[in-house]
Image (tube, rainbow, N blue to C red):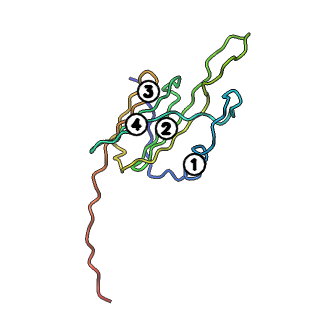
């Protein structure tokens, strides 16, 4: 059985600066012609997030990515999916007439709609689609605290 690497962590602090880059990517216009796109910019996989009363599901479209080049990191508040899609081999002679497929590194950090239990995460990778199932964390209990005099 093959496994996808999953790392558990308490903080995604090192991704804090990447949040700014992510926001820029959201509002930056896409190139009109992919042949003139920045080669080092990587690509962003399409994802769906679905929530039920007890679980959160993520489906990611990762066509052409090999399982060995895919990593997932998760904590109770966020998930990071990153990896590499390697370029397909091409014949020595020839020239591009259309180039729309993006290759290289990708990364998505998704802040979850609710806290999840990072110890209960399951994944499946079939036909270029990654599915992730996460169980929601039980609600935090609140406690009343007595206030002492003077």
Disc 3: which residue = 129
Q: Is residue 33 left or right of residue 19?
A: right
Disc 2: which residue = 81
- Among the 4 quarters of the image, the one containing residue 7: top left
- Mark 3, secondary structure of its residue: strand
Q: Name the residue at the bottom extreme.
A: 150
Q: Residue at x 62, y 24 (%)?
A: 100
- Mark 4, secondary structure of its residue: strand
Q: Is residue 15 left or right of residue 93?
A: left
Q: 40 or 6, which lies in front?
A: 40
The answer to whether the residues at label 1 and label 2 have Cβ atoms under 8 Å apart is: no
Q: If you read the primary sequence from the N terminus, does the residue marked by circle 4 or circle 3 appear first? A: 4
Q: In the rendered image of this protein, does residue 108 appear above or below residue 70?
A: below
Q: If you read the primary sequence from the N terminus, does the residue marked by circle 1 or circle 2 appear first? A: 1
Q: 136 or 30, which lies in front?
A: 30
Q: Which mark is residue 58?
A: 4
Image quadrant in which the C terminus is located:
bottom left
Q: Residue at x 47, y 44 (%)?
A: 110
Disc 1: which residue = 23
Q: In this rendering, which labeled residue sits more in front, label 2 or label 4? A: 4
The answer for how far apart the CA atoms under marks 4 and 3 are is 10 Å
The answer for how far apart the CA atoms under marks 4 and 1 are is 20 Å
The answer for how far apart the CA atoms under marks 3 and 1 are is 25 Å
Q: If you read the primary sequence from the N terminus, does the residue marked by circle 2 or circle 4 appear first? A: 4
- Mark 1, secondary structure of its residue: helix
Mark 1 crowdedness (10 Å alpha carbons): few <14, some 14-19, many ≥20: few
């Amino acid at each position: 059985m093959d496994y996808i690497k999953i790392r558990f962590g308490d903080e995604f602090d090192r991704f804090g600066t990447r949040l700014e880059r992510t926001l820029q990517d959201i509002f930056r216009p896409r190139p009109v012609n992919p042949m003139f796109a920045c080669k080092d910019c990587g690509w962003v996989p399409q994802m769906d997030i679905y929530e039920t009363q007890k679980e959160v599901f993520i489906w990611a479209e990762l066509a052409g990515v090999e399982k060995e080049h895919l990593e997932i990191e998760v904590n109770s508040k966020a998930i990071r999916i990153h990896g590499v899609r390697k370029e397909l081999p091409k014949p020595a002679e020839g020239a591009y007439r259309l180039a729309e497929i993006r290759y290289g590194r990708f990364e998505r950090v998704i802040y979850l709609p609710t806290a999840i239990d990072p110890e209960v995460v399951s994944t499946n990778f079939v036909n270029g689609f990654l599915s992730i199932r996460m169980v929601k964390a039980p609600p935090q209990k609140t406690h009343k605290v007595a206030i002492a005099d003077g």
